[in-house]
Image (spheres, rainbow, N blue to C red):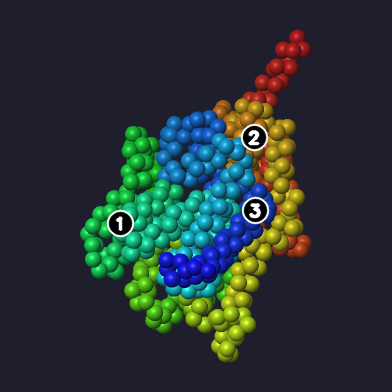
Amino acid sequence: MADSPTGIPSDTLLARNRSILILAGIFVLMNLIGRDRSSAVWSDEVTLNEPAKELALHGKFRSLVFSGSDGFDERYLWLPPAHPLLTALVYRVFKFGIWQTRIPVVLFGGCAIVLLYFIARRFLNDHRSALYSALLFALNPQFIHTARSGRMDAQCLFFAFAGILFYLRSLTHGKKSLFLAGLSVGLAGMTHPIAVVWAFAIVALIIFTQESAKFSSLIIFCASAALPAGAWLIYALQTPVYFKAQFLTIITEHTAGGSIFSRITDELRRYGIVYQPVPLLLIAFVASGSWFVYKFRDAVLEKRRLIILFLIPFFFVTAFMTKSGGSWFYILHPIAVLTIMVGAMAGSFLPATMTRIGSALQRTSLILGLLLVANLVLAGIGARYIILGYQWDARDYRTIEEPLRTLIPKGSIIFGAPEVWYAAENIGASLRLRGEPDSRVHDFVITKQKDSIAAIPGFRKIAEVGVPFPPVWGRFSFSRADYQMVVWEADRRIGNVVRLTALIGE
């Protein structure tokens, strides 16, 4: 078969690309199983997709779950708009629901894996190492968690990886690729502000690793990266009070406090907590990072670039980002680069093929590599499947939606648990999350049964809905979430019903 322009036979290129496409397809398929049941509906999924629902169904880019404060019921400026705008399009075409919220996220996750493979192959110049890096990232439990949760992290990683790949391409293909690199990173920033780490990283690459045209490259990259942010700011600053109350407030709330020493120790502790179920991955990160710095001798310039791409996101997240809440997903950015280093080390020690194991070191390396993959499978997607097997019926969203449909009339305002968001919209009600229960405003309050709330002033308990998630093997309760809810009705509504009955009787 004819050679490609790179000099590599085109059938070989096809085979290599086929491998990563198959891996990405498997990632998507394995995360479609039980997608409406795992993860359970949770607060981030609601707060991040509420403006998409409002835009698609009611034509207003706002957030009613935060209604009543900071202008949320007028304009949504809490976070950049790329994720809710895309989700709104999905809702508009395919209707509102759990599947519709989560499907785009897993598709972006699969595409991000493909891009990570090409980044790794560009740096390591080795198909096996790049594929192993992509495999480890695809099996990373934290990446699987966000790809199944209706968040924007996978979309952010996709555009960030595209930006890195375009930048690497610009080193040989000129300014057009550099413009696309900036635009991609800018779009990543419109999905999540954390993408600013990649803008800083690529600026550092231009300054410290390019030999010529540094100034013009900086101008092109920074200008194109600023385009999406500039367009959003023109819109957002039409209401500066709302912009300050929403976006600037959440940025402040997600900024780390304490000494730099405490931030470093807290960050390292967080890595330990997140990856406690996969200790072999933690060991691989430490070992491969050290090995890459001291032993990886090929392509010194490429080595320096990859180290910069790891260090800037890692130290930015460590120094500036809070260690609670959604910040648990920030670590995926430096982890992605660290995973490429694991692939580099694996490529140096693993045998070229499974049928040609030449030494005891290669045999040991193969065993360790397979054990690492097994650890990721068992603690990640495998554990989810096991939990789903025991909790399939209990995680069915209909266990709360159907009872609520009989209890809550259309047009009601509900205050309470974010888990009922889909049910509230489907029955024609509206959910509120911010503030306190108010019987003058809220018709119903829904609380979690595990909160053991004995009374709510102005409301009376009318029902308990949902079922507990049974423990796995009858012993282990891996999830703190469930759909057991308590429904409270405002006293004024009950009084209205009584008075209406009396009038009819007369």
User: Up-down: is 430 above or below 131?
Assistant: above
- Examine the image and state in which quarter residue 93 appears: top right
Per the model, the C-alpha gap separating discs 2 and 1 is 49 Å
Per the model, the C-alpha gap separating discs 3 and 2 is 22 Å
Q: Secondary structure at mark 3?
A: loop
Q: Secondary structure at mark 1?
A: helix
The residue lying toward the viewer, choosing from 416 and 496, is: 416
Q: Earlier in the sequence, mark 1 or mark 3?
A: 3
The residue tagged 2 is: 426
Q: Nearer the viewer, mark 3 or mark 2?
A: 3
- Examine the image and state in which quarter residue 196 appears: bottom left
Furthest residue in direction top, as rendered: 506
| Badge 3 vs badge 2, beta-carbon distance below 8 Å | no
| Badge 2 vs badge 1, beta-carbon distance below 8 Å | no
Q: Residues within 10 Å of mark 3 (few under 14, many from 20)?
A: some
Furthest residue in direction front, as rendered: 2
The residue tagged 3 is: 32
Query: Residue 122: x, y in percent?
Result: 42, 68
Q: Secondary structure at mark 2?
A: helix
Q: Residues within 10 Å of mark 2 (few under 14, many from 20)?
A: some
Amino acid found under the numbered disc labelled 3: Leu
Q: Earlier in the sequence, mark 3 or mark 2?
A: 3
Amino acid found under the numbered disc labelled 1: Lys
Q: Residues within 10 Å of mark 1 (few under 14, many from 20)?
A: some
The residue located at (56%, 82%) in the rendering is 351
The residue located at (43%, 57%) in the rendering is 162
Query: Residue 165: x, y in percent?
Result: 41, 61
The residue tagged 1 is: 175
The residue located at (65%, 68%) in the rendering is 378
- Tell me if 276 is positioned left or right of 488 in this view: left
